[in-house]
Image (cartoon, rainbow, N blue to C red):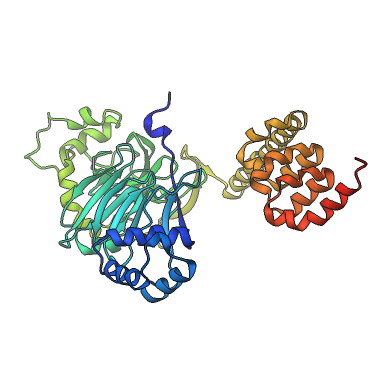
Amino acid sequence: MKTNLQMKEALKLITIIPNIIQYKLFFNTILKSNAEIAIRLEEKLNNLNKKIEELSLEDITIIVENLFWKNLKIYNLVNTKDEFCLPFMYTNLFYGLKESLELFPLSKYDNQFLDIINKYGKVLYEDAYFVHLLNNNLIIIQDYDLNNNLYKYDSKSEELVFIAEEVDDSFFESPIRFSENKLFFSNGYVNENFEPQTPFCFDAGKEFNEGLAAVCLNGKWGYINHKSEIVIDFQFGDANSFENGFAKVFELKPEFKSEKGNWIEVNSSNQHSQFNYSEDVFDINFPQFPIQIKKPLSVIRKLQKKREEFIEQYHFYALGFGNNSYNLPIDTDKYGKWITIDKLGNQVNIEIAIEADLEMKNRKARLDVLEKEERFNSWLKKIINHSDLTFSVPDDLFLSREFVIKSIQENPKCFIHFSTYYADDDEICEIAFNLNPDLYYYFSERLKSVFLDKFNELQEELPF
């Protein structure tokens, strides 16, 4: 059973160059606003002695030229039926969109304030003075009093969740980037709600990618997964994120390696007498960590951190302090060499690995082609035998000109259903007409006029 959220239809943002009807809707919205432009519009209507509904195209042209921006565009959200879901009032999209973006900051005509609207048409925030969208639905909103507050958009509840207030202006140029819902700072990883996701015992950490993240512990790099399990032990001088199943790491020469996993001795001078050795929070919160690592770390490092601590440190991090790059001096061959490893930590020949990866992708591409051809032919066979099934053809095939032309050639009656989209397509309509002139009745008015003489000639040739 689908949930209410799953049943919701995501809307599409479009830009409209208004026609006469849409201008009238826009004018009505303007008159209901408190903007200064509303007074000037009302004066124009009084001078013309007309109501908005009575305006001609010439009247609208005069009003637009005198009162509004040139090349006025209106933003709106539409559903799959091309129905408008917002009032005709938004004339500026404040922020460039990304494909994954779920929020639209839009402003009304002659108004610098912004409404934040989600992809379902719900207004989440009204009259923001400034908006800055970060990664993973984090958003900084500057309110009417010029206070910068940090929010997280929760797509399940469709609400903006407050994270922190009085965010520094420098956040707008912040290097913060969440990857796979995790961000490294303050010696560990937090999620978008600034909740702890890993132990906070690392010297440095890089972005999660393909389920793994490179982390540094006492000068050695290894990899952990989303469960904080050590997947590849700490042994490298440096390590990069995985990409297509492989990662580049700096393999240290034996003389620069310690025994794997034992970077901190239990009797290390870094220990502090104030720690209670019997209190092992590591065992409670991260039982999957190897015993030889977690026991010393539990007494040397501060492991229990609360969400409030991260919010306090967020300002400091965003300014570029607390940099998460921590590398050994590996500028020469003295210390080791760069190698490529797989997700098991095994060294691989990168050329062979790339070739194998390419072959796998090519094999998948070939299978995709075969699958598409089989699907193409299967649907073609269905509608050749039963043209009424054309209305249920999948969207990608319905929009495939090759499929449409082939279908009409095999069974001209298919055009009746395809005409809902292709009635004004010169090539497809000509093919349909040559196969069955009576399909002329399903052409657009423009193409009916083009084929009218030819259609009349054919009608006259009929014996009855």
Q: Nearer the viewer, residue 415 or 257?
A: 415
Q: Residue at x 38, y 34 (%)?
A: 5
Q: Nearer the viewer, residue 72 or 52?
A: 52
Q: Residue furthest top?
A: 1
The image position of residue 4, as x and y in percent, is 37, 31
Q: Nearer the viewer, residue 255 or 319?
A: 319
One can see residue 241 in this view: yes
Q: Is residue 22 above or below residue 462?
A: below
- How many marks are shown on the rendered structure? 0
Q: Quadrant of residue 387?
A: top right
Q: Is residue 378 above or below residue 433?
A: above
Q: Residue at x 46, y 44 (%)?
A: 79
The image position of residue 346, as x and y in percent, is 49, 40
One can see residue 334 in this view: no
Which corner quadrant holds the C terminus? top right
Q: Residue furthest left?
A: 274
Q: Residue furthest bottom?
A: 66
Q: Residue at x 66, y 38 (%)?
A: 368
User: Is 65 left, or right, of 220 in this rendering?
Assistant: right
Q: Is residue 49 above or below residue 435?
A: below
The image position of residue 288, as x and y in percent, is 30, 29
Q: Quadrant of residue 450?
A: bottom right
The image position of residue 98, as x and y in percent, is 43, 54
Q: Is residue 79 above or below residue 385?
A: below
Which corner quadrant holds the N terminus? top left
Q: Nearer the viewer, residue 57 or 432?
A: 57
Q: Quadrant of residue 413?
A: top right
User: Is 349 left, or right, of 428 in this rendering?
Assistant: left
